[in-house]
Image: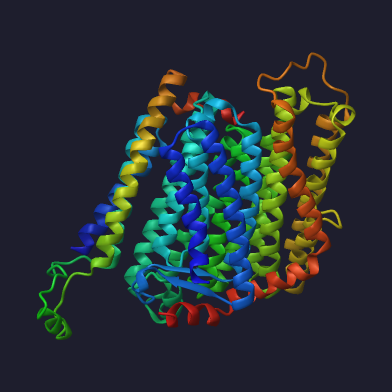
Amino acid sequence: MKTLVVLPLLIPLLGAGTSLIFRGKAFQRGIALGVATLLAAANLGVLAAVLCKGVVCVQAGNWPAPFGITLVADRFSGIMLAVTGVVAWAGTLFALGTLDGRRQRFGIYPVLQLLLMGVCGSFLAGDLFNLFVWFEVMLIASYVLMTLGGERAQLEGGLKYVGVNLVASALFLSGVGIVYGMAGTLNLAHLSMRLPTAGPPGLLTTAAVLFLAAFGIKAAIFPLFFWLPASYHTPPAAVSAVLAGLLTKVGVYALIRTFTLVAAQDVAYTHSLILILAALTMITGVLGALAQHEFRRVLSFHIISQIGYMILGLGLFSPLALAGAIFYIVHHIIVKTCLFFVSGMAWRLRGTGELDRLGGFYSTQPGLCAVFLIPALSLAGLPPLSGFFAKLFLVQASLAQGQYVLAVVALGVSLLTLYSMNKIWTLAFWQPAASGAKTPSEPIEGNRGWLLAAAPAVLLAVLSIALGLGAGPFLEICQQAAGQLLDPKEYLAAVLESG
Amino acid sequence: MTLLLALTSGGLFAAGWYLMMRPSAVKLVLGVALVSHAANLAVFAAAGAGRQPPPLLASEGVAALAGSLPVADPVPQALVLTAIVIGFGVLAFTLVLVHRAYQTVGSDDLEEMESADR
């Protein structure tokens, strides 16, 4: 049981190690598929274990809790790991089908596996400093993924991405230092017990705001989002799909984790700040998207706007709101990755992402239209798709707390999202192909390539429908996860008494 | 001692931030280096740096520890050591990235690196 929690870290590490030693392209592709499959199985296994047995905790080297390295999986971590496993599997298939030979030879698969290790490690980390280290593992891998290939746009976007994230890391580290100075420990469970009596509450609020800024940069909340639309559309679609699906959500996960377990002392100040930021993030993101005319840039701005909804759930800080935020994260990861897959296929068909120069897919590629329409409507929040329920729970939660302005903002932004998706649909799919459309420079090769590219997109679209149809049972799991977050007794007991 | 460390850390943060605001990619790298060192010093300052002896004990010294002998806290040192290693790796990567961007764009002016923003 306990070894299961280590597998999400071991599988990608071993995979990356072997594929860095043996550099053959066929070998690396085989390893990539194997790692993705095993990782998906292991992560779903962790979720199953957590749902059956409660919080699972591993003390590395058998050092008891506040002294050693602790890996903890509660329901929230389990849900995040499971969806990461599924999206990683889909992303790997898409990469196998669409990546060019040069990037494959220069080791994109091992870097992708290291990225997944960092993501899984962040979800499992039981203390703040390990969270910092896993963040760095994930970020360094993402720097390489972002810039591998060396095209001019990639280097320019990558430079901004690296610079901004280094600032975030420095802020995070300063916050860690302050918290350690106050409480003398960094173990999240131990901190949650010690911090309420550890020192001046103003100092803790300072550390909390440092964490908010650091994770806010990584999660791309207002006003720290500008790096995202400058960089996410530059790497190949397979890479940007995985980055868009997973990376900002790790920032949201860290925000939710720290602001429930560590920095939940001065809720009146920090969480109302988060609410204001949430509203501004939703609005600026969607307005940015309206002004864009490139497929992936529109989608990038929508990531920002959707992050606002998740932060809204954290800011409201009620069981239903947190459950809604977790539901939203899962829905968003699935849907957004799927939309990036579609944008990648459109790019491969026409050699451009400019909406004005796309068009005509409705008559030539009806299948692609269906795979776009499902996640797009889900993103805008049409029933019975997953996005409808995700938004419904958050709006219900804000109405229950009398936050009418936030509810109106959430609904208005969702309407603008529909408008923006409609724009992509009309320009890229519905209207006739633009005259003088050039032939693509790198078409997808053969039926096998198309199968590998289309299958993961179809899988994720189906998952979005399934999540909508099974919203009731899944909301129950999310509510249990939210319950564990708001009342961390079980988490504390598992970490501090398991040694 | 702590005050001196705190002031130094603050000064490094200020200098680093300033350099990062300049429109030159090389200054961006220098700023990143200063800011990461400033964060390391901040950890030391916040966690309490002093002149205590290192926490190395002979076997009979374990008994002495029980008598509240003041020794330095090893945890912030371990944290900072890890952070320095990570910061060094990232700095090396950033240098190569800036060099590559300079080769491709033909200038280290960040104002000219905006094709990805349009």
Relative to residue A141, is residue B28 drawn left or right?
left
**Which one is nearer the viewer's eye here, B55 or A226?**
B55
Specify the color scheme.
rainbow
Quarter location, residue A22:
top left
Relative to residue A357, is residue A495 drawn left or right?
left
**Which one is nearer the viewer's eye here, A176 or A189?**
A189
Name the image quarter holding the C terminus of chain A.
bottom left
Residue B58's place in the image compared with B112, above or below, is: below
Relative to residue A381, is residue B44 drawn left or right?
left
Q: Write the residue at 82% across / 30% down.
A: A427
Name the residue furthest right: A363
Is residue A213 in sight in this rendering?
no
Relative to residue B68, is residue A333 drawn left or right?
right
Residue A171's place in the image compared with A347, above or below, is: below
Quarter location, residue A422:
top right
Residue A449 percent location from the top left of the image: 70, 31
Residue A94 percent location from the top left of the image: 66, 39
**Which one is nearer the viewer's eye here, A268 or A337?**
A337
Q: Write the residue at 48% across / 35% down.
A: A107
Residue B96 percent location from the top left of the image: 37, 31
Is residue A228 in sight in this rendering?
yes
